[in-house]
Image (cartoon, grey):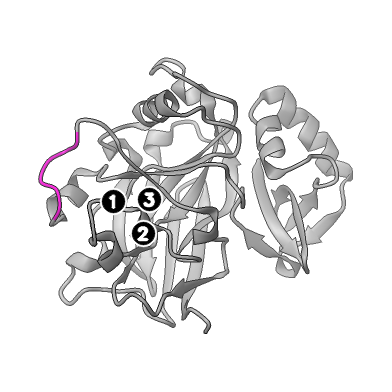
């Protein structure tokens, strides 16, 4: 099952995507988070399927997709979580003993098909393709044994980064939270659709050329470690998004650097999940 949020004119709707349409369930649930919590269980998915069968359907071409959970309470991101990204890094030289966690703000993300914006304050706008997990139930102090039970589904994530601002200090947040600099989507695929998340392959393309490709099996801190660690310092809630890290091949290491400039298209594909595509423009003045 695919869960998405979209704008129909100026109205936010959310529901189930089937084929080229979305069944609008926004009158049946208080928020996208509530829908995510419902589809987290088999019985909930059955109820949602029945509701979608009789709901109003809208063609995807008539809406603007937003991040699956546009106002997530938490957007947590894991840094330096692939060995080849550490190897190319000019900041770290070995795998961290614990997950490196930073946050993004909801205003920093756009949905599939929306424009990414390059800020005039930065000259080094970089891409990072990632697999994102979306939490489906309140979770605190998860263990390795039950951590995957907290995951409602998976999405594609583009952790757009203003490298110059990221390097101002040891704190990542400024470089990671420029308005409309990252993306998530095009939807959330429920976890029951993914037999083995570690068999997923992540591929990032810039203007159609592959720049990153890796299996989720190569994560240094795996999904169990990420969920258990994050749920130790905060209570994870339905709709929370965790981006699990980017593999090697980012733009700043290339010769010359491959920055996201206006007109360029960046796509993040995760097998079995979907393809997130966005084009870059200059931030409107």
Q: Which mark is residue 67?
A: none
| Disc 1 from disc 2: Cα separation | 8 Å
The residue carrying pointer 1 sits among few (fewer than 14), some (14 to 19) or many (20 or more) residues within 10 Å by Cα, namely few
Task: Tell me: residue 1, above or below residue 222.
Answer: below
Residue occupying image coordinates x 47% and y 73%:
117
Residue bearing mark 1: 171
What SS does tag 1 mark? loop
When the figure is inspected, residue 146 is found, relative to residue 216, above or below; the finding is: above
Neighbour tally class for label 2: few under 14, some 14-19, many 20 plus, Cα within 10 Å:
some
Q: Nearer the viewer, residue 137 or 18?
A: 137
Relative image position of residue 111 (x, y in whole percent): 57, 61
Tag 1–tag 2 contact (CB < 8 Å): yes
228 in relation to 36, above or below: above
Q: Is residue 129 left or right of residue 39?
A: left
**Residue 93 sits inside the magenta stretch:** yes
| Among the 4 quarters of the image, the one containing residue 48 | top right
Q: Position of residue 183 (x, y in %)?
A: 49, 59
Q: Does 63 appear in magenta? A: no
Which residue is under mark 2? Answer: 174
Instruction: Choose top left, top right, bottom left or bottom right for residue 96.
Output: top left
- Which disc is residue 202 wearing? 3
Q: Position of residue 110 (x, y in %)?
A: 55, 62
Please say if the residues under marks 3 and 1 sit with CB atoms less than 8 Å apart: no
Sequence-wise, the earlier of marks 3 and 1 is 1
What is the crowding at mark 3: few (fewer than 14 residues within 10 Å), some, or many (at least 20)? many
């Amino acid at each position: 099952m695919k869960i998405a949020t979209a704008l129909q004119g100026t109205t936010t709707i959310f529901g189930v995507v089937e084929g080229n349409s979305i069944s609008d369930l926004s009158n049946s649930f208080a928020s996208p988070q509530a829908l995510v919590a419902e589809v987290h269980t088999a019985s909930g998915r059955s109820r949602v399927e029945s509701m979608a069968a009789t709901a109003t359907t809208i063609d995807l071409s008539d809406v603007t997709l937003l991040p699956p959970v546009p106002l997530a309470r938490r957007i947590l991101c894991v840094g330096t979580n692939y060995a080849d990204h550490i190897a190319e890094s000019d900041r770290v030289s070995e795998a961290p003993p614990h997950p490196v966690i930073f946050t993004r703000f909801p205003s920093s993300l756009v949905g599939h098909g929306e424009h990414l914006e390059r800020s005039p304050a930065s000259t080094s706008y970089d891409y990072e393709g990632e697999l994102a997990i979306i939490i489906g139930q309140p979770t605190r102090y998860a263990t390795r044994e039950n951590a995957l039970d907290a995951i409602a589904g998976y999405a594609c994530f583009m952790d757009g980064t203003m490298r110059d601002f990221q390097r101002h200090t040891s704190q990542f947040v400024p470089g990671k939270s420029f308005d409309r600099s990252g993306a998530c989507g095009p939807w959330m695929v429920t976890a029951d659709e993914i037999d083995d998340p570690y068999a997923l392959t992540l591929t990032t393309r810039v203007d159609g050329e592959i720049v990153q490709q890796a299996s989720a099996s190569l994560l240094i801190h795996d999904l169990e470690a990420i969920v258990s660690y994050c749920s130790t310092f905060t209570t994870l809630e339905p709709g929370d998004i965790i981006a699990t890290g980017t593999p090697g091949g980012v733009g700043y290491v290339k010769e010359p650097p491959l920055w996201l400039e206006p007109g360029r298209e960046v796509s993040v594909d995760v097998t079995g999940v979907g393809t997130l595509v966005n084009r870059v423009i200059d931030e409107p003045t």
